[in-house]
Image (cartoon, rainbow, N blue to C red):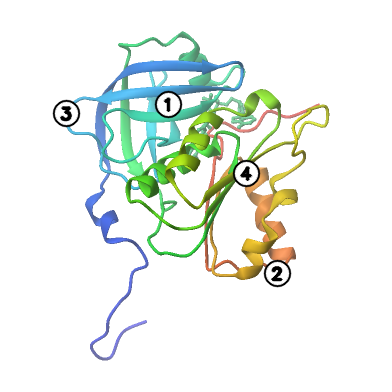
Amino acid sequence: MIPSSDCVISVPVTAASCKTGQQVFAATVTRIEPHQDAAVVLELAVDGAAPAFLPGQYINVGVPGSGDHRSYSFSSAPGEGDLGFLIKKIPGGLMSSWLARAKPGDRLELTGPMGSFYLRGGEGPLLFLAGGTGLAPFLSMLEVLARAGSQRQIHLIYGVTRDQDLVLVDELAAYAGRLPNFTFATVVADESSNHPRKGWVTQHMPGDMLAAGGVDVYLCGPPPMVDAVRGYLDENGIRPASFHYEKFTPNAPLKATA
Ligand SMILES: Cc1cc2nc3c(=O)[nH]c(=O)nc-3n(C[C@H](O)[C@H](O)[C@H](O)COP(=O)(O)OP(=O)(O)OC[C@H]3O[C@@H](n4cnc5c(N)ncnc54)[C@H](O)[C@@H]3O)c2cc1C
């Protein structure tokens, strides 16, 4: 299209994104905390100035000695001392195997920040849907909302496969104390689990919140979970005020199952 007169172009991104740009950063591992066989909390101190990023964005982390990288969403908020990540343990995975032998003091190279999945401004209700370590970007968003003293209605549904995949629930409970209108529900898919809420995230959607309308929906997790939720919203005619999603697409092709 060629404009034939003066025109105003509206770009639907926050002004804060103008202050973020991709760079290469050297970083040192400061903390590695495994959560059984489910996940690892990784914290890094960046040499010099830390990356400016938006809550929800990710960065590429080089896997030492491999020439390859993996993408990870920040679980820490912009401006915190160390960068935080929540990483799923994949048996035999390239990064997972490195993390299993990593220790504080190890060095990493980061490239970023990247991504258009980040928390937008506004005052309307927020529905956060996390699958597994897809919780990471929501921890960053919740911290930013808590710091800002947000009064927004926020409901997070955190769905996992097994009981032991539910990690950092204590951090969510702490946000429930800091954010007056924040509630969350954990959901476990494993049929043998005794968890009070079983099944999939889509079986625990907040009907009243969605019926009231005006909800900004943010969704993050493995591709099958993201696709299932998108299908659910379509099939049920749910039209959020805005809808944003991030798929944790593997870099390596999925292993064929027998
Ligand atoms: C934008 C973006 C952000 C991401 N943020 C995060 C994050 O915050 N936390 C996080 O844990 N992951 C995140 N990921 C996924 C991450 O980048 C890696 O794909 C994941 O950590 C696996 O890396 P690996 O080197 O351990 O395994 P790989 O060596 O990549 O994979 C080994 C094998 O396992 C399979 N595999 C990979 N992932 C899975 C899975 N989830 N379930 C089953 N099989 C799998 C692969 O296909 C391959 O066959 C993100 C991905 C993207 C694209």
Label at residue 237: 2
Q: Dot 4 corresponds to which residue? A: 223
Of the image marks 2 and 1, the number of the one nearer the N terminus: 1
Please state which of the two labelled residues, at mark 1 or mark 4, is closer to the viewer. 4
What's the residue at 32%, 30% (across, down)?
A: 110
Q: Horizontal and vertical percent for residue 73?
A: 44, 38
Marks 4 and 2, how far apart at CA:
21 Å
Q: Dot 3 corresponds to which residue? A: 48
Q: Are marks 3 and 2 in contact (CB under 8 Å)?
A: no
Q: Dot 1 corresponds to which residue? A: 68
Q: Can residue 134 be seen in the rendering of this structure?
A: yes
Q: Answer yes or no: disc 1 within 8 Å of ligand 1.
A: yes
Q: Answer yes or no: disc 4 within 8 Å of ligand 1.
A: no
- The type of residue carrying mark 1 is Asp
The secondary structure type at the circle numbered 1 is strand
Q: Can residue 56 be seen in the rendering of this structure?
A: no
Q: Split into 4 quadrants, where in the image is the N terminus?
A: bottom left
Relative to 136, residue 216 above or below? below
Q: Horizontal and vertical percent for residue 236?
A: 73, 65
Marks 2 and 1, how far apart at CA:
41 Å
Whether residue 177 sits left or right of residue 205 in the image: it is: left
Q: Are marks 1 and 3 in contact (CB under 8 Å)?
A: no
- The type of residue carrying mark 4 is Pro
Please state which of the two labelled residues, at mark 1 or mark 3, is closer to the viewer. 3
Q: Quadrant of residue 121?
A: bottom left
Marks 1 and 4, how far apart at CA:
21 Å
Q: Residues within 10 Å of mark 1 (few under 14, many from 20)?
A: few
